[in-house]
Amino acid sequence: MATEPDDVGQEGEQDEERMDWDRGDEEESEESGAAASGNAESARSADAAAAGSGDPSPVGVKLGSTRTVLVHPDTDGEMATTTTLTCLATYEDAITGEERLLYGEEAATEYPDEVEFMLRSGLPEDDERADLAGRFFREVVTANGVDPDSVVVYAIPSIDNEQGLANLERVIDDSGIGDRAIRSYPESLCGAIPAMGDGLEAIESIFVGVNLGSTNLEASAYRRGEQLSHFATGAVTGNEVDRRIANLVEEETQGRVNIDGTTAREYKEQHADFESFEPFTDVIQQPGGGSHEFTIEWSVMEALDEYVDEAVDELANTFLSEFANDSMKTYNLALDNDIVLTGGMTCIPGLVDEFESRLADELQRDVTVIAPDDPVTAAARGAQRIADRLVDRGAY
């Protein structure tokens, strides 16, 4: 097993470009380190440095299209992990008339018709959604008592979307945390860290990381933290699975049942299982009164079966094919090591093994596919470990 790196966040032999999210002069700079290209960094301000006492808190964050995860030390010094739906709703106080805000599961449950999921595409696409995302994240940070005197590492999607990334930068800068430093690393790298060991073994390895997310399928090849090759598509996604489930449910019930995307996602999360799927029943209210009970036998798993086939095809015949053409030696080294699946779709029981079997058949070679024990929180946990290393080394 590879040893933990000595140079995370410090100057080393590899150079990289990072956006500088400096709260002061916002000057862009080029720094070196053993992190993936395209990472973002914010140097601590002079005022924050003067005010800070002792070591800052190491914090990891994943602002996801469906769920946001926050990992930080609590008041007892223990690591706290918070997961919430990335959504908010506003309402008017019945007594004062003031606007009130709810976020997460509470907002989705109490205001299902008005709740806003502002990162459905993976990034805030415009000023309005950036403002909503900023309000949401400030509420999450405040409710969890995250220390402003902190080093914060964000796990972000590797998407070629300049405006969306700029909007995300604004959301992060205005969050009220990360006074010492703000940095970001690719989500697939952060999510691979808990899967590959108890430390930062992933930063010292050569491997392929695949993020099976709600809004994108991403694949990257990493060599000691350096992102050598990258691929992303919005055609094979968790959200597309939800739409496919909704259509297949209508087909299976011969048009008697129409479900929305939220219900389809719940069917996927609660019932999809490559190892031991069992048909399930549900009930809908009919117009004019009464109810209709129906059973789902194949809609959910047919949608998932198609998803895995498409994901394997994209990985094998697009990303890995191009990676092999660019560098056959590095390609072979990477495939000799574990391929790491991250993202919410890997929560489905049996999907990792199914992916491994189909990918091996497609490539006509043995491969090993692994995933973190809790894919939903893995990226934020990996980001927090990077932040902890930066604090430990004083590399902020």
Image: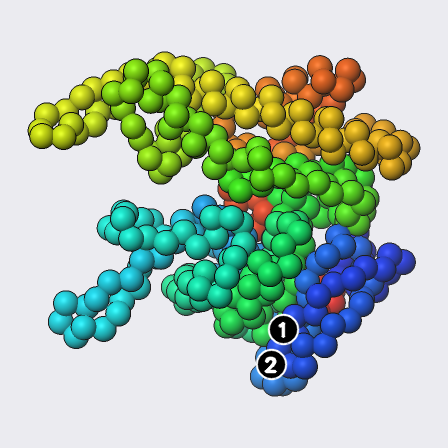
Confirm or deny contact between disc 1 and disc 2 (CB under 8 A): yes
Which label was assigned to residue 54?
none
Residue at 29 percent across and 53 percent down: it is 114
Horizontal and vertical percent position of residue 221: 76, 40
Residue at 64 percent across and 50 percent down: it is 159
Quadrant, the C terminus: bottom right
- Between 349 and 355, which is closer to the camera in this rendering? 355
Residue at 57 percent across and 58 percent down: it is 164
- Asked whether the viewer can see residue 351, the reply is no
| Label 1 sits on residue | 180
The three-letter code of the residue at mark 2 reads Ala
Q: Is mark 1 on a helix, strand or loop?
A: loop
Residue 356 position by quadrant: top right
In the picture, measured across the screen, residue 276 lies left or right of residue 237, that is left
Which label was assigned to residue 48?
2
- Between 110 and 72, which is closer to the camera in this rendering? 110
For label 1, the crowd category at 10 Å Cα-Cα, with few meaning under 14, some 14 to 19 and many 20 or more, is many
Residue 179 position by quadrant: bottom right
Residue at 54 percent across and 21 percent down: it is 306
